[in-house]
Amino acid sequence: MRKIYLDYSATTPVKKEVVEEMLPYFTENFGNASSIHGFGQDAKRALEKARAQIAATIAAPADTVYFTAGGSESDNWAIKGVMRANKAKGNHMITCKIEHHAVLHTCQALEKEGVEVTYLDVDSDGMISLEALKAAIRPTTVLISIMFINNEIGTMQPIQDIAQIAHESGVLFHTDAVQAYGNVKIDVSAMGIDLMSVSSHKIYGPKGVGALYIKKGIKIQNLIEGGAQEKKRRAGTENVAGIMGFAKAAQIAHDSLEAHVEKLVTLRERLLKGILESVDYVKHNGHPTLRHPGNVNVCFEFIEGEALLLSLNAKGIGGSSGSACTSGSLDPSHVLLAIGLPHEIAHGSLRLTIGDFTTEEDVDYTIEALKEVVQKLRMMSPLYDRIQGGK
Ligand SMILES: *Cc1c(COP(=O)(O)O)cnc(C)c1O
């Protein structure tokens, strides 16, 4: 059976060059980067080279990049760290309803500490309103945290405008750029970003590594306490092999950005067109143009997303649904509800995300498979039956 991976927004395979870059750091150059001896200093040198490489991909000075254990930790650190360190200024922050749970659940945890959080609505394309953002700012607002690109529907927010609005009021701006990094050109200073979360495993690097960009001079508390690593700001023996892989992946992504985006957009449009032409009662979600290059998110009416995923899986296709199946609840995705979809439509959602190893044949096979599977599932839907009968 063919095996087609269309879930690149969940994670990506590690590229061979990345694995090769990492290998010596497990066996030969295995030193603890904090050690004085040569083994340690070799590791330290590699670590600082990786830091400079990653910083260069976002046009930041090397000493503003801090390594973490991934996007979730970076989000937690940015938001908790800034809110806890700036209590003298205020206890209010602004985010939006379609953030990743790494942001939303962090905000909910902070609410228990007395932080007040405004969750901005989004429109039917998943865009926040800049007017609503301005109106939500209070004298006590410390931080605005708005994601760069949404992981479910692919919508890209106007990051520069948000940063400008934040700075006009003396508010800090954090963005979860986990889905944007490697898919969009990012210049943190030109864009006015104060803090930015990125993750390695979404850009063909290893899992469990990420980074937080912290602009110089920002007041932020530590999240992980312990040793003096990362200039005493993030304790824990550095994951040197992982970080070397991350830097290699970041370098490749940066050097091949244009070709990567062009390839993904072409395949994305082919997939979307194919779906819209071969299936009826389907709705395309997310912004029509300002979106992730490889994201297709659609809702099929009269179908249960979980059933659709399982049927596709039986044909070797790995996609994702928006619903929170992992939590064991039947609630549809908070993102799809926030863009105004009724529960029954949100339940029939499918996210297919394309990446560097996706081929035209994969896309065409998927369109055919979807056509067949959707038809089969709808035959079991009494509602669809009634609507067809009425035609
Ligand atoms: C994957 C993802 C995260 C979490 O990153 P991890 O490295 O898996 O912890 C956070 N935000 C967004 C938008 C993501 O897509």
Image (tube, rainbow, N blue to C red):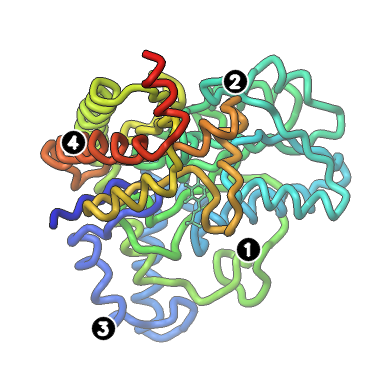
The residue drawn where x is 65% and y is 35% is 97
How busy is the neighbourhood of tag 3: few (under 14 within 10 Å), some, or many (20 plus)? few
Would you name the residue on which mark 2 appears? 123
Q: Is residue 59 visible in this depiction of the protein?
A: no
Say if 11 sits above or below 363 in the image: below
Would you name the residue on which mark 3 appears? 28
**Which picture quadrant has residue 303?**
top left
* Secondary structure type for disc 2: loop
CA separation in Å, label 3 and label 2: 53 Å
Q: Nearer the viewer, mark 4 or mark 3?
A: 4
Amino acid at the residue labelled 4: Glu
How busy is the neighbourhood of tag 4: few (under 14 within 10 Å), some, or many (20 plus)? few
CA separation in Å, label 4 and label 3: 49 Å
Would you name the residue on which mark 4 appears? 368
* Secondary structure type for disc 3: loop
Residue contact between numbered discs 2 and 4, judged by CB atoms under 8 Å: no
Q: Is residue 195 visible in this depiction of the protein?
A: yes
Could you tell whether 102 is left or right of 268 in the image?
A: right
Amino acid at the residue labelled 3: Glu
Tag 4 or tag 2, which sits nearer the N-term?
A: 2
Amino acid at the residue labelled 1: Arg
CA separation in Å, label 1 and label 4: 51 Å
Would you name the residue on which mark 1 appears? 233
Could you tell whether 139 is left or right of 256 in the image?
A: right
